[in-house]
Image (cartoon, grey):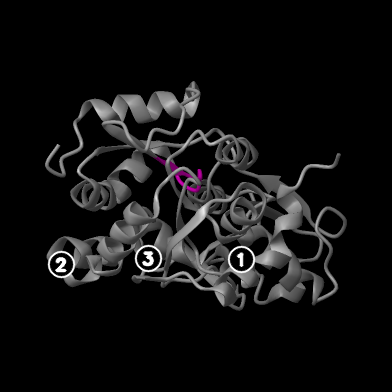
Amino acid sequence: MNGIIKLALWAIFALSILFPPTLPAAPQGETLTLGVFPYISANQMMEQLSPLCNRLEEALGKQVILVSAPDFMSYVDRTTKGEYDLVLTAAHMGYLAEKRDGWQRVVQSGQKTAAVFLVRQESSVKCLEDLRGKKITVGNRRSLTYLLAKEALAEKGIILDKDMEVIETATFSNVVQSVFLGEADVGATPTLLWDNWEHVNAEQQRQLRDIFRTRPAAPSFLVMASPKIDQTTIRRLTDSLLSFQDTEAGKTFFQKSQFGSFQPLDDATMESAAPFIHVLVQPQ
């Protein structure tokens, strides 16, 4: 496709959110599927990640199709079943995929996950201690952002679902919108989204303010490859993504996406995600 994703893929990707197909991994075929964990809306995801798909296509000489899943756990399940060839995934999901299912490391994002607490400008809330008895909106209870927010509140003696009512939204973008509309007193969302990100509009930036930021934890994103992908392809992928930041397209991509860069994916990084995988493992 010469690095161009056809317009028809917009429809294919949107349908994959609503009616996701069961796709076998096909490393030897003409197309590859890039499974992206559902952290933003389908339209935002396609807009943000198209340059990354172009880079992958150039490296592999194959068409790359973006697909996702309706929620975090169905995404984890489809990764386990091998329905994707490549994944752009959260760190704890990647750690689980490697340890349990044999997924292979490619790269990590330079940007790391941290949670920011947002309130409206006129809110009386000044710090975490003021949140007891308030209503909080979050993106997903199995996300690193939620876990970091929960930990930060617990350190102040505030227990979610006991001392605060929790509203779970479909995406992190909805968290910002929920606080903006006054549906919740506070929202916890990734700093990746809030800090200079084009999908938070100017009015939201004016009407909201942050009161606390957690410590950065694991990287925001890992790129990993199916166990069926051969080592030559893995090396080609790794080399291409590590050098992406040296191109004009890459510089634009990293600036707009706030990924920071792509970096080698090492043992220390993977282990930093280990404490969070308990929320992804279903009870037997």
Disc nearest the viewer among 1 and 2: 2
Residue matched to label 3: 259
The residue mark sitting in front, 3 or 2, is 2
In the rendered structure, the answer to whether residue 249 lies left or right of residue 240 reads left
Quarter of the image with the N terminus in it: top left
Asked if marks 1 and 2 touch (Cβ < 8 Å), the reply is no
| Residue 263 against residue 49 in the figure, above or below | below
Query: Who comes first in sequence, dot 3 or dot 2?
Result: 2
- Front residue of 211 and 78: 78
Magenta-colored span? 34-40
Q: Is residue 57 visible?
A: yes
Measured as percent of width and height from the top left, residue 223 is found at: 43, 56
Of labels 1 and 2, earlier in sequence is 1
Q: Residues within 10 Å of mark 2 (few under 14, many from 20)?
A: few
Nearer the observer, 118 or 103: 103
Q: Residue at x 48, y 45 (%)?
A: 226
Residue 138 among magenta residues = no
Identify the residue under disc 1: 123
Residue that label 2 marks: 247
Q: Name the residue rendered at 71%, 57% in the picture.
A: 277
Image position, residue 41 (x, y; %): 43, 40
